[in-house]
Amino acid sequence: MKNNNVRLKEKLAKHGKDIFISKHVEIKYPELVEIGSHIAIDSGFKCTVQMKLGDYVHIAPDVVVIGGKKGYLELGHFTGIAAGSKIVCGSENYVEGGLIGPTIPEKFRNLIIKPVIFENFVVVGVNCSVMPGVILREGSVIGANSVVTKNTEPWTVYVGSPARPIRQRDKVTALKYAKELGY
């Protein structure tokens, strides 16, 4: 085990080996979190949702995942979230009425709670936002400062707000290296 947050790791529903979790990580519901092997979760990560991480996952500093106990985030193998990004698994519907705010009882709010899924080989750049219900398809890359509001296409690079495709990504080498690691 690496030098990390041993107490938090012991509270997780499930975890693999070779895991680094900074002592400055906040996971609100660790009993609803499963993580694989070869994981690095850096300082400032905050998570308020259920979460499942595959193998070879990196979550950089100051990443925030929100959505409450009913929210859900899944990161496949060989995925990453760069510094400062926000993953929104649950939010208020600000347009269609209801009261707004976490201190308001749920029956008076109009919530949008939808899982966010990163398939294998997905990377999200610095300071991105991913909105509820988005599926980032295998091999997608999201450029810095982008806002993802819709599902992506496999092995495609996206940039902008809202994120739009700009080019295809070569998958041959990534798949070859993953195979060498046993995937």
Image (cartoon, rainbow, N blue to C red):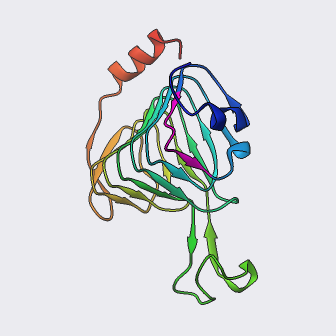
| Residue ID at (54%, 35%) | 76
Q: Which of 3 and 109 is in front in this view?
A: 3
Q: Where is residue 101 in the image (x, y as percent from the top left)?
A: 59, 80
Say above or below: 44 vs 172.
below
Say above or below: 32 vs 93.
above
| Residue ID at (62%, 88%) | 99
Residue 24 magenta-drawn? yes
Q: Where is residue 103 in the image (x, y as percent from the top left)?
A: 65, 79
Quadrant of residue 130 in the image? bottom left
Q: Position of residue 119 (x, y in %)?
A: 51, 39
* Segment tinted magenta in the rendering: 20-27
Side (left or right) of 137 relative to 48: left
Say above or below: 16 vs 46.
above
Which quadrant does the N terminus fall into? top right
Q: Position of residue 6 (x, y in %)?
A: 62, 30
Say above or below: 92 vs 117.
below
| Residue ID at (35%, 21%) | 172
Quadrant of residue 174 in the image? top left
Residue 176 magenta-drawn? no
- Count the labels in the image: 0
